């Protein structure tokens, strides 16, 4: 049987859902093909034991881009922004640092720290605001640009020059390609505070605080704050994935789950549909891939259908995942030294100093796991009781760094690494070990297999400068386009990159709709 | 591949035929060619030239870059590499191919030999390993450099068939142009292809380097009865122009060595549009070439006769009607057999068409004084020299 659709979206992650919903609302017949058994990609809830569930890979997030929330009326489909979460940077002795809405607080935090932090934050939020036209539109071409590209560049230029003012613009140009270590060392004194911010800049990336370009990854993260506060992802009905699924369905899009695409059908450089794992063919003049660029172009399209140099560039996209995910099923709430029970609803991190984060990164450069990894800990079951039996809990831990290509392979190292991380956690929550009912560690290789993301990278490709803006995912495929006519990309591998912003999906949809001939 | 660790002791490597070439070289005029010491001339140019056109010439082709391409996807790999439709290629056949970069600009040309099922040899002027490896992403294919493992000898001229047969190589009578035969010569195996770069009757012999000298000696043993001469690159330049063959890197800049915009060339621009099949499956550069084909022709390498007998080397070409400089001669030769000045010129088209009247400004020296004359050019649509005996099967016996 051959079905005919207007649009096929490969992968119903949040960007795919955003993109497809815009297209469905524009009157197109949209079919989502999702290889997993749930939509929402990395936000979809997963079982770690019969009675214990976690919200998948995504642990904390900023609200989805305000424009998308409004356009797709997500609130009417149950979307609500989660409770604002503070960041608590743990110290073994209980002298924790808290960064909340009101700025940093804690034993070692002085007035001058608070002031310097506020100033830094304000300055960088201004930069993020100035860059907004760049994030919210397709990245402008620098040659042969169209009207939209011109307006994006004009707005960007205006924001940088007039919006920021010349002093701020000069400062922005100075810091744009710098590393977080130097920036934070210039601006702040409190080591704990610097450590926490440095961890934010490298989270999900194969970068240490001293890696050039980490200012940009931090700015990208800060731009999320323009939409609201960070919250803990808890898998409840108000979460982005669920609301998007309902919005998509309401706009007439259809879904197939457990529907694995084997290849994108291409003839004479034009995509005309997909072939499913079971051999079924579904035809559509528009195929949009929410999968990462390498999987899409090398596996689903295949290098033989591409020009040689382009295929080579695709194969060179940098994006080896460097974060492992530890899930713990707990028979009770752990006790953290120096924290009250209510504090555990927030985001806990282990990144006591910048040097700690940098040292954690060192082994990863040589294909080894961090001796003392940076941790991001949440207990989503405190907010969403349905995740665990009454009185029980689930804990999610992002473990950084854990390289995809581990020297000696993951098979042998996996259990040992999990115990090491648990031991490390016990230094902050001594009773943790006695509460563990079950556990799972997802290495980047597991993430690759289970979430169909090449090399298990959260962001579908490193967000380095050479893989950003009009170079994301790569030269020759910017603006959500590919060399294959009728095939577009809409995932985190495209501009402006990862995070639960929905921005790549939105921009891709705008691009595709703008290209359609007026009917 | 065995690595010769002593290679640095010589700036230029000796080919397996070197001892024989050196013994016959009267001019000692050597040059470098792909890292090998190669003869520019060995004798008077006229002696060498008429060996090709009137008797038999031998040229050492070992420096040509040679790649063995094998494996399950070898055919698919090659079909995606080159612009030509390879579906008619069979074991025992050779075909002439070109390949482009993503922008549809020529990287090199070469001859592709299908030696067996899933066994190919690609023979090219320039080093291609990097491009072949880049092109191999996504294919189950094995690529090996065999430049130094295969000694190659071109035997070209009207009496080439007779000499090879008399030297003990049986089985050439039925070998058609672009055919390959696996044969024997005095007990050692060799591969013979009916190919060449001279436009004459001729063969290329591919042999294990350890048999190179024996092969040479077997051929030159016939010399008392049928004349045979080694030739160098200078003669090759003359005869290849007569035959209308172009040379990448000389007649046009190859894409991967081009820095300036618009200095590289597409197959259409060098007159090899007939090698491009836009209807076969995908190949590198297809979309760019499709777009180029939809635009008016911008320029083309064009074969021209230049009036007069003044030697032409480099010269500008002018559109007689508008008096505008529109091109330049890339290579030229005086053809002794045609008694004409032949050239291949890179000419800008005017409104998608070749201007009807072309003139060349020829600068030449007389007793060291530079003079300039205007010579009319006549376009040749066909190769300048295509003798009938070139393709006769079986070839005439002498």
Image: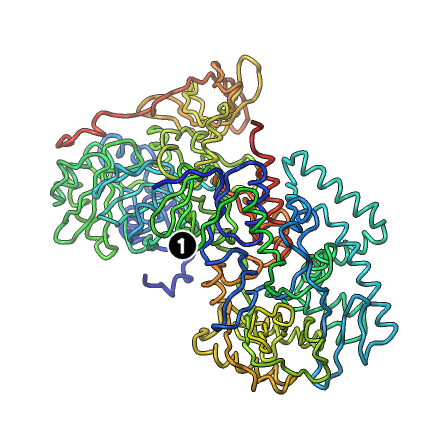
Q: In the figure, B345 relative to A474: above or below?
A: above
In the foreground, B275 or A254: A254
Q: Residues within 10 Å of mark 1 (few under 14, many from 20)?
A: some
In the foreground, A388 or B104: A388
Q: Percent position (x, y) of residue A61?
A: 65, 61
- The single residue placed furthest to the right in the displayed view is A111
Which picture quadrant has residue B209? bottom left
Q: Quadrant of the N terminus of chain A?
A: top left
Q: Quadrant of the C terminus of chain A?
A: top right
At 50% from the left and 78% from the top, the residue drawn is A438
* Residue at disc 1, secondary structure: loop
Q: Is residue B186 left or right of residue B230?
A: left
Q: In the figure, A324 relative to A29: above or below?
A: below
In the foreground, A38 or A358: A38
Q: Is residue B141 left or right of residue A409?
A: left
Q: Percent position (x, y) of residue A39?
A: 52, 55
Is residue A386 visible to us here? Answer: yes
Query: Which subunit holds the residue at mark 1?
Result: B
Q: Which residue is mark 1?
A: B12
At 72% from the left and 74% from the top, the residue drawn is A88
Which picture quadrant has residue A513? top right
- The single residue placed furthest to the front in the displayed view is A390
Q: In the figure, A432 relative to B243: above or below?
A: below
Q: In the figure, A143 relative to B334: above or below?
A: below
At 81% from the left and 56% from the top, the residue drawn is A171
Q: Percent position (x, y) of residue A91?
A: 71, 81
- The single residue placed furthest to the top in the displayed view is B321
Q: Percent position (x, y) of residue B141?
A: 33, 53
């Amino acid at each position: 049987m051959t079905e005919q659709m207007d649009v096929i979206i490969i992968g119903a992650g949040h960007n795919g859902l955003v993109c497809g919903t815009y297209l469905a609302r524009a009157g197109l017949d949209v079919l989502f093909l999702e290889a997993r058994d749930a939509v929402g990609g990395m936000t979809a809830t997963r079982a770690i034991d019969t009675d214990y569930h976690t919200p998948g890979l995504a642990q904390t997030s900023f609200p989805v881009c305000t424009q998308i929330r409004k356009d797709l009326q997500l609130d009417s489909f149950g979307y609500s922004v989660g409770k604002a979460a503070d960041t608590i940077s743990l110290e073994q002795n209980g002298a924790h640092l808290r960064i909340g809405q009101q700025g940093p607080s804690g034993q070692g935090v002085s007035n001058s720290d608070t002031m310097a932090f506020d100033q830094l934050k304000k300055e960088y939020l201004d930069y993020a605001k100035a860059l907004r036209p760049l994030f919210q539109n397709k990245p402008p071409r620098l040659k042969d640009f169209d009207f939209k590209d011109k307006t994006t560049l004009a707005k960007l230029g205006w924001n940088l020059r007039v919006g920021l003012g010349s002093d701020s613009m000069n400062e922005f140009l100075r810091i744009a390609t710098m590393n977080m270590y130097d920036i934070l060392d210039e601006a702040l004194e409190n080591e704990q505070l610097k450590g926490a911010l440095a961890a934010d800049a490298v989270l999900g990336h194969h970068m240490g605080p001293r890696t050039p370009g980490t200012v940009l990854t931090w700015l990208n993260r800060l731009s999320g704050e323009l939409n609201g506060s960070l919250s803990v992802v808890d898998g409840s009905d108000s979460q982005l994935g669920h609301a998007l699924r309902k919005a998509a369905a309401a706009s007439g899009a259809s879904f197939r789950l457990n529907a694995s695409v084997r290849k994108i059908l291409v003839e004479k450089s034009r995509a005309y549909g997909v072939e499913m794992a079971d051999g079924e063919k579904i035809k559509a003049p528009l195929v949009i891939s929410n999968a990462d660029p390498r999987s899409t172009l090398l596996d689903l399209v295949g290098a033989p259908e591409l020009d040689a140099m382009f295929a080579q560039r695709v194969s060179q996209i940098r994006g080896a995942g460097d974060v492992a995910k530890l899930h713990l099923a707990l028979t009770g709430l752990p006790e953290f030294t120096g924290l009250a029970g209510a504090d555990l609803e927030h985001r806990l991190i282990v990144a006591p100093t910048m040097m700690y984060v940098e040292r954690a990164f060192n082994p990863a450069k040589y294909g080894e796991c961090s001796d003392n990894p940076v941790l991001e800990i949440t207990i989503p079951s405190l907010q969403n009781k349905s995740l665990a039996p009454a009185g029980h809990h689930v804990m999610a831990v992002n473990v950084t760094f854990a390289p995809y290509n581990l020297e000696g392979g993951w098979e042998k190292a996996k259990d040992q690494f999990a115990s090491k991380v648990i031991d490390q956690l016990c230094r902050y929550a001594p009773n943790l070990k006695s509460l563990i009912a079950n556990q799972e560690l997802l290495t980047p290789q597991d993430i690759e297999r289970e979430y169909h993301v090449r090399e298990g990278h959260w962001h579908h490709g490193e967000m380095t400068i050479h893989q950003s803006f009009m170079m994301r995912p790569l030269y020759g495929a910017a603006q959500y386009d590919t060399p294959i006519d009728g095939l577009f990309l809409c995932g985190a591998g495209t501009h402006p990159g990862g995070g639960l912003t929905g921005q790549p999906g939105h921009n891709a949809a705008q691009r595709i709709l703008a290209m359609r001939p007026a009917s | 591949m065995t690595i010769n660790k002593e290679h640095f002791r010589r700036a230029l490597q000796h080919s397996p035929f070197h001892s024989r070439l050196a013994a016959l070289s009267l001019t000692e005029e050597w040059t470098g060619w792909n890292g090998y010491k190669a003869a520019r001339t060995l004798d008077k140019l006229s002696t060498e030239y008429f060996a090709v056109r009137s008797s038999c010439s031998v040229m050492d082709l070992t420096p040509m870059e040679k790649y063995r391409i094998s494996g399950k996807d070898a055919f698919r790999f090659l079909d995606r590499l080159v612009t030509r439709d390879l579906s008619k290629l069979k074991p025992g056949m050779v075909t002439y191919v070109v390949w482009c970069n993503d922008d549809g600009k020529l990287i090199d040309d070469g001859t592709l030999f299908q030696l067996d099922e899933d066994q190919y040899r690609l023979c090219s002027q320039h080093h291609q390993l990097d491009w072949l490896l880049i092109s191999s992403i996504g294919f189950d294919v094995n690529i090996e450099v065999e430049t130094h493992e295969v000694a190659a000898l071109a035997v070209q001229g009207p009496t080439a068939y007779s000499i090879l047969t008399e030297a003990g190589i049986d089985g050439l009578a039925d070998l058609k142009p672009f055919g390959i035969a696996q044969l024997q010569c005095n007990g050692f195996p060799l591969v013979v292809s009916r190919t060449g770069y001279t436009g004459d009757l001729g063969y290329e012999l591919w042999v294990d380097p350890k048999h190179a000298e024996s092969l040479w000696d077997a051929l030159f043993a016939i010399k008392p009865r049928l004349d045979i001469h080694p030739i160098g690159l200078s003669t090759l330049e003359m005869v290849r122009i007569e035959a209308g063959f172009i040379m990448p890197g000389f007649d046009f800049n190859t894409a991967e060595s081009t820095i300036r915009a618009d200095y590289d060339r597409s197959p259409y621009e060098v007159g090899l549009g007939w090698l491009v099949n836009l209807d076969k499956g995908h190949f590198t550069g297809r979309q760019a070439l499709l777009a180029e084909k939809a635009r008016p022709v911008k320029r083309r390498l064009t074969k021209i006769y230049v009036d007069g007998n003044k030697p032409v080397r480099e010269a500008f070409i002018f559109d007689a009607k508008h008096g505008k400089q529109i091109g330049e001669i890339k290579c030229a030769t005086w053809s002794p057999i045609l008694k004409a000045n032949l050239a291949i010129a890179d000419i800008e088209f005017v409104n998608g068409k070749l201007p009807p009247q072309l003139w060349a400004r020829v600068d030449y020296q007389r007793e060291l004084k530079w003079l300039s004359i205007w010579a009319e050019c006549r376009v040749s649509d066909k190769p300048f020299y295509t003798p009938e005996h070139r393709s006769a099967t079986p070839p005439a016996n002498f």
